[in-house]
């Protein structure tokens, strides 16, 4: 048996990370690079992408910034093709990019609903569909979909977001059903509130955040690096027998 360092190593691997310009995405780029992976960082914000690339290169790995609008039908496909053109292969896909609008069901607009579905659900499908053929050819691949606790536990004012993430969980299972035979492992991570810029915006007010924390046995919200560390595990050979799972990262919230 190989050592634990070898089992968690990503040396020689290439990862595409969406939403790479901030929060969980930029942290995932750094953590995966620290384990040996080269990184294709995908997002809309060029300044944030530059930060992610700098962090990866400071760790001695290669990186490319790919600007893409994942709300469009062409953006995810073009981003995947750009990563393949640059590195020749993508071993690990991290579908991390996500958006939301905090509004009640009655106030949810068609435009917001469609945009959330495009970024949170359609983009992961398009990226995976574009990258899976070369994974199938090489008989190896990892697809990690960052979903949400809200996909399984109702949260007011997040109807479209919850629906998109629930769909992502289902998509993960069908990916597993169709691609596991090609040695491709597909899993979803379901975090509770994570202290990203989006998390701070929604939950930063103690009047709203404190009651939510009170429901979490751990008594706190999560940090981006904690999600990134789970991404690393699922990207490594240490997790090869985990496939089609939806893994809670919620401080015990759903255990109650």
Image: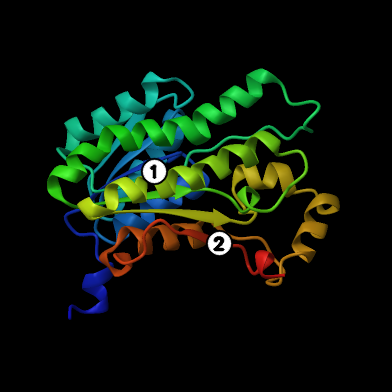
Horizontal placement of 245 versus 153: left or right? left
Q: Which residue is mark 2?
A: 248
Q: Helix or strand or loop: what does disc 2 sit on?
A: strand
- Do the residues under discs 2 and 1 have CB atoms within 8 angstroms? no
Q: CA distance from mark 2 to mark 1?
A: 26 Å
Q: Nearer the viewer, mark 2 or mark 1?
A: 2
User: Which residue is farthest right?
Assistant: 207
Q: Which residue is mark 1?
A: 52
Q: Please provide percent x and percent y for residue 16.
A: 32, 42
Snapshot colouring: rainbow
227 versus 239 height, above or below: above
Q: Would you say residue 26 is visible in this rendering?
A: no
Q: Please provide percent x and percent y for residue 88.
A: 14, 38
Q: Residue at x 68, y 65 (%)?
A: 253
The quadrant of the picture occupied by the C terminus is bottom right
Horizontal placement of 138 versus 110: left or right? left
Q: Which mark is residue 118?
A: none
Q: Please provide percent x and percent y for residue 207.
A: 86, 52
Horizontal placement of 12 versus 202: left or right? left
Q: Helix or strand or loop: what does disc 1 sit on?
A: helix
Query: Are there few (<14), some (14-19), or many (20+) residues within 10 Å of tag 1?
Result: many
Q: Would you say residue 120 is visible in this rendering?
A: yes
The quadrant of the picture occupied by the N terminus is bottom left
Horizontal placement of 237 versus 127: left or right? left
Return the disc, 2 or 1, that comes first in the chain's sequence. Answer: 1
Q: Residue at x 55, y 30 (%)?
A: 117
């Amino acid at each position: 048996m190989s050592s634990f360092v070898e089992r968690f190593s990503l040396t020689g691997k290439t990862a595409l990370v969406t939403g790479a310009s901030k929060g969980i995405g930029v942290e995932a780029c750094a953590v995966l690079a620290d384990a040996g992976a080269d990184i294709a960082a995908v997002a809309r914000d060029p300044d944030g992408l530059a930060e992610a690339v700098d962090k990866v290169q400071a760790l001695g790995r290669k990186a490319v910034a790919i600007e893409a609008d994942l709300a469009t039908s062409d953006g995810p496909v073009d981003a995947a093709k750009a990563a393949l053109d640059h590195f020749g292969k993508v071993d690990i896909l991290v579908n991390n990019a996500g958006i939301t609008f905090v509004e009640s069901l009655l106030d949810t607009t068609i435009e917001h609903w469609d945009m959330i579905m495009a970024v949170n659900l359609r983009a992961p499908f398009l990226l995976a569909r574009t990258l899976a053929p070369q994974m199938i050819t090489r008989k190896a691949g990892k697809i990690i979909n960052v979903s949400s606790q809200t996909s399984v536990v109702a949260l007011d004012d997040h109807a479209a977001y919850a629906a998109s993430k629930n769909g992502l969980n289902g998509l993960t299972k069908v990916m597993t059903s169709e691609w596991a035979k090609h040695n491709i492992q597909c899993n979803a991570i379901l975090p509770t509130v994570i202290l990203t810029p989006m998390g701070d915006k929604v939950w930063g007010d103690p009047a709203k955040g404190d009651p939510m924390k009170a429901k979490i046995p751990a008594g706190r919200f999560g940090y981006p690096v904690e999600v990134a560390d789970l991404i690393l595990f699922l990207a490594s050979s240490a997790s090869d027998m985990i496939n089609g799972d939806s893994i809670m990262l919620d401080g015990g919230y759903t255990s109650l």
